[in-house]
């Protein structure tokens, strides 16, 4: 139940984008110019879904980042360093920083939201996330690889220069 609640609460914060993409409008090919204009007005207003306030069962990413993660032995094994979500706003994974000391020597692993249970904070402290894994299992898990876009490759054509600027010509101008 807690896993479902956590997934639902975190997904709700990003659900506005997903709802906006699922709206349908009348076909513009068979509508009159006036209907097309009205349809365009409706489409633009339908895509704006304001959320007035955060609910008690919702978390903000800014607050969620840094949340302690407990292992199966209830000892801290790391903390949330980032959240991975797709274009529709669906949360794919929580990126957890594990091992190391004060960030030195740590590594990141990513786990699906349903891997976690929410543990209420004690005496007013922040809620924590709990995994059914040990710190050793997390240290031995595959390191999360952040996406890096491909770098442009250097071209080897007549228009490229390796000097970073224009070079003076060694041939005299034509006609002189």
Image: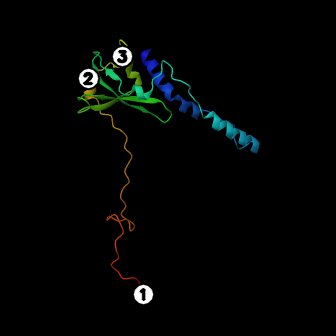
Residue 140 falls in which quadrant of the image?
top left
Which x, y percent locates residue 66? 35, 27
Q: Whole-Å distance between the Cαs marked 1 and 2? A: 79 Å
Q: Which mark is residue 125?
A: 3
Position of 26 with respect to 137 (left or right) is right
User: Few, some or many C-alpha atoms within 10 Å of disc 1 (few <14, some 14-19, many ≥20)?
Assistant: few
The residue under the point 45% across, 26% down is 60
Determine whether 20 is above or below 174 in the image.
above
Identify the secondary structure beneath mark 3.
loop
> Is disc 1 placed on a helix, strand or loop?
loop
Q: Quadrant of the N terminus?
A: top left
Residue 120: image location, x then y, percent:
38, 14
Q: Nearer the viewer, residue 148 or 46?
A: 46
Label 1 close to label 2 by CB (< 8 Å) = no
47 or 60: nearer the viewer: 60
Q: Nearer the viewer, mark 1 or mark 2?
A: 1
Q: Quadrant of residue 30?
A: top right
The tag earlier along the polypeptide, 3 or 1, is: 3
Q: Earlier in the sequence, mark 3 or mark 2?
A: 3
Provide the residue designation for mark 1: 175
| Picture disc at residue 135 | 2
Q: Position of residue 52 (x, y in %)?
A: 56, 25
Q: CA distance from mark 3 to mark 2?
A: 22 Å
Residue at the limit of the structure toward the top, as seen here: 123
Element type where label 2 sits in the image: helix
Residue 124 in the image: x percent, y percent?
Answer: 38, 14
Residue drawn 51% across and 33% down? 88
Other residues around mark 3 within 10 Å, as few (<14) / some (14–19) / many (≥20): few
Query: Would residue 55 be visible to someone looking at this image?
Result: yes
Q: Is residue 32 visible?
A: no
């Amino acid at each position: 139940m807690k896993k479902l609640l956590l997934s639902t609460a975190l997904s709700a914060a990003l659900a506005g984008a997903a709802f906006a993409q699922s709206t349908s409008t009348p076909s513009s090919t068979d509508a009159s110019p006036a209907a097309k204009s009205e349809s365009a007005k409706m489409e633009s207003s339908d895509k704006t879904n304001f959320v007035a306030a955060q609910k008690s069962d919702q978390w903000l990413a800014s607050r969620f980042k840094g949340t302690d993660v407990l292992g199966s032995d209830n000892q801290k094994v790391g903390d949330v360093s980032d959240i991975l979500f797709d274009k529709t706003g669906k949360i794919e994974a929580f990126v957890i920083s594990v091992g190391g000391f004060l960030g030195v020597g740590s590594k990141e692993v990513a786990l699906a939201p349903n891997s976690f249970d929410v543990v209420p904070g004690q005496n007013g402290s922040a809620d924590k996330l709990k995994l059914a894994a040990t710190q050793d299992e997390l240290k031995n898990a595959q390191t999360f690889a952040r996406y890096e876009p491909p770098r442009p490759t250097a071209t080897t054509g007549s228009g490229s220069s390796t000097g970073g600027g224009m070079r003076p010509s060694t041939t005299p101008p034509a006609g002189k």
